[in-house]
Amino acid sequence: MDAKSAFLNRDLKEEIYMKIPPGQNRPERHVWWLRKTLYGLEQALQEWYTKVHKIMVGLGYKVSIADKCVFTCIDANGYLIIVAVYMDDFLFISKSLKFVESSKSEMSSHFEIKDLGPAKWILQMELNHDISNGITTLSQSQYIEEILEHHGMTDSRPVKTPMDPNTTLPSLSVPEIDVIKYQQCVGSLMHAMVWTHPDIAHAVGMVSRHATTPGQAHMTAVKRIFHYLQGTSDYKLTYQ
């Protein structure tokens, strides 16, 4: 489910001012005093979470110790429901569809929410459910294609391993290449590693150690991982 206007119109505790947008007939020295939250404010996300937390706990949910954006509840029949909140999206997980529907109905009385149906895409992951065989697969083929294009690796030649076993990455005292570009490449790879590609975990871990002082050898190793993803973009995690 998707919450509409999640970050708008939350009450602000701090006193915040903003420049007046172009097109308003106001003197340049004037500013606006914000009375409610807007998208882009750090406070907007915090105030939204405060509201979500209050309502979920009020509905009988418990907050996960491991992740404050994960809420759980058990109904009278012993069914567990897990609600994961990311920004303004809610993901419901349960063996009982009836429990899911009643939970969504309860939340709809507190939030203006759009029901998007069974989860198919979340956090740049594609979810496929084979209900009859009890199989769920996760993949990021579209995300991998996007990062390959973004980093100019679309036409890269696929390789069979994410790192050459003979590769030695030297420790440098000062960077030899653009640090920001290097960190962006590694960050793109980390997102794939964490969600659906544990097969690149070792290689990404190795190049991550040199994120502040990278050299050409390190960038070559990073590009090797992109080459590997080029040939394995359709790999999927399968849960049974």
Image: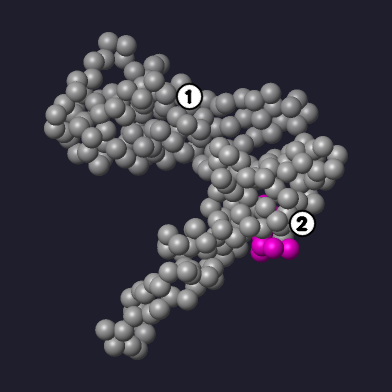
Labels 1 & 2 near each other (Cβ < 8 A): no
Instruction: Please provide percent x and percent y for residue 35.
Output: 47, 76
Taking depth in this image into account, of 143 and 84 the one nearest to the observer is 84
Task: Please name the residue shown 27% across and 84% down the image.
Answer: 29
Instruction: Determine if the magenta segment contains residue 139.
Output: no
Taking depth in this image into account, of 132 and 73 the one nearest to the observer is 73
Instruction: Determine if the magenta segment contains residue 113.
Output: yes
Above or below, comparing residue 112 to residue 233 in the picture: below
Q: Where is residue 6, by image quadrant?
A: bottom right
Q: How many marks?
A: 2
- Mark 1 element type: helix
Q: CA distance from mark 1 to mark 2?
A: 37 Å
Outermost residue toward the top in this view:
166
Tell me the tag on residue 105. Answer: 2
Task: Please name the residue shown 47% across and 69% down the image.
Answer: 13
Specify the principal SS of the magenta part. loop
Within 10 Å of disc 2 (Cα), the crowding (few <14, some 14-19, many 20+) is few
Taking depth in this image into account, of 92 and 153 the one nearest to the observer is 92
| Mark in the foreground, 1 or 2 | 2
- Mark 2 element type: helix
Q: Is residue 168 left or right of residue 193?
A: left
Taking depth in this image into account, of 70 and 225 the one nearest to the observer is 70
Q: Is residue 12 left or right of residue 179?
A: right
| Type of amino acid at the residue the image marks with label 2 | Ser
Instruction: Please provide percent x and percent y for residue 149.
Output: 37, 39
Q: Which residue is mark 1?
A: 198
Instruction: Please provide percent x and percent y for residue 100.
Output: 76, 46
Magenta stretch, residue numbers = 109-116
